[in-house]
Amino acid sequence: MKQFKSSRHTPQATDTLIGKGTVIEGTLSGESNIRIEGSFIGVIESQGSVIVGESALARCHIHAKEVIIAGQVYGDIHADQKLTITSTGQLTGDVLSASALIIAEGAILHGASLMHTRARDTSSEESSVVVEPSYLRPEAG
């Protein structure tokens, strides 16, 4: 009997789902994994993983343990461990921190990537003034 190897990317459990056709605006924070298939505007902070599905549009800053982008994200990313942009993923914003950055062929990254070592000195934090980039603002229409 043939043994099947596990796939390269094991699907993660989803604790919070923003479904296709759903639009949410605000701050979402928690300890669980979050999957976006609809639209989200605001800030996401998770101790788990954040997955932006192929049909998703996120105009937000994301800070999570791991971030996987298969849809469109307009905002900055803090990944405590790994950031993956799949072949269908688009990120317009900066990668402010990530231990590992994986960008698949066909993925789009418009922004800067700042990779820090784990022994980074956090005592000299930058100014706490937050300037909202224009790509986070909803388009006037």
Image (cartoon, rainbow, N blue to C red):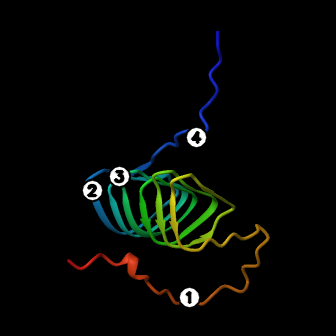
Instruction: Check the image and report above or below for 58 versus 127.
Output: above
Residue 55: assigned label? 3
Q: Earlier in the sequence, mark 2 or mark 1?
A: 2
Residue 10's place in the image compared with 129, above or below, is above
Q: Secondary structure at mark 2?
A: loop
Label 3 vs 1, first from the N-terminus: 3
**Which residue is depicted at the point 39% across and 76% down?**
136
Residue assigned mark 2: 22
Q: Amino acid at mark 2?
A: Thr
In terms of sequence position, does the residue under pointer 2 or pointer 3 come before the other?
2
Q: Residues within 10 Å of mark 3 (few under 14, many from 20)?
A: some
Which of the image's four quarters has the N terminus?
top right
Identify which residue is drawn at 39% across, 82% down: 134
Q: Nearer the viewer, residue 10 or 27?
A: 10
Q: Which residue is mark 4?
A: 9
Instruction: Please report whichever mark, 4 or 3, sits nearer to the chain's N-terminal start.
Output: 4
Kindly report the distance in space between the C-alpha atoms of the residues bearing marks 4 and 2: 26 Å
Say what secondary structure mark 3 lies in: loop
Residue 21 is situated, as x and y percent measured from the top left of the image, at 25, 54
Residue 85, by quadrant, is bottom right
Identify which residue, 7 or 120, lies in the foreground: 7
State the CA–CA distance, disc 4 to disc 3. 19 Å
* Nearer-N-terminus badge (4/1): 4
Residue 111 percent across, percent down from the top left: 54, 73
Amino acid identity at mark 1: Ser
Label 2 – label 3 distance at C-alpha: 11 Å
Residue 128 - label: 1
Q: Nearer the viewer, residue 110 or 37?
A: 110
Earlier in the chain: of badge 4 and badge 2, it is 4
Residue drawn at x 43%, y 64% is 73
- Secondary element type, mark 1: loop
- Furthest residue toward front: 106
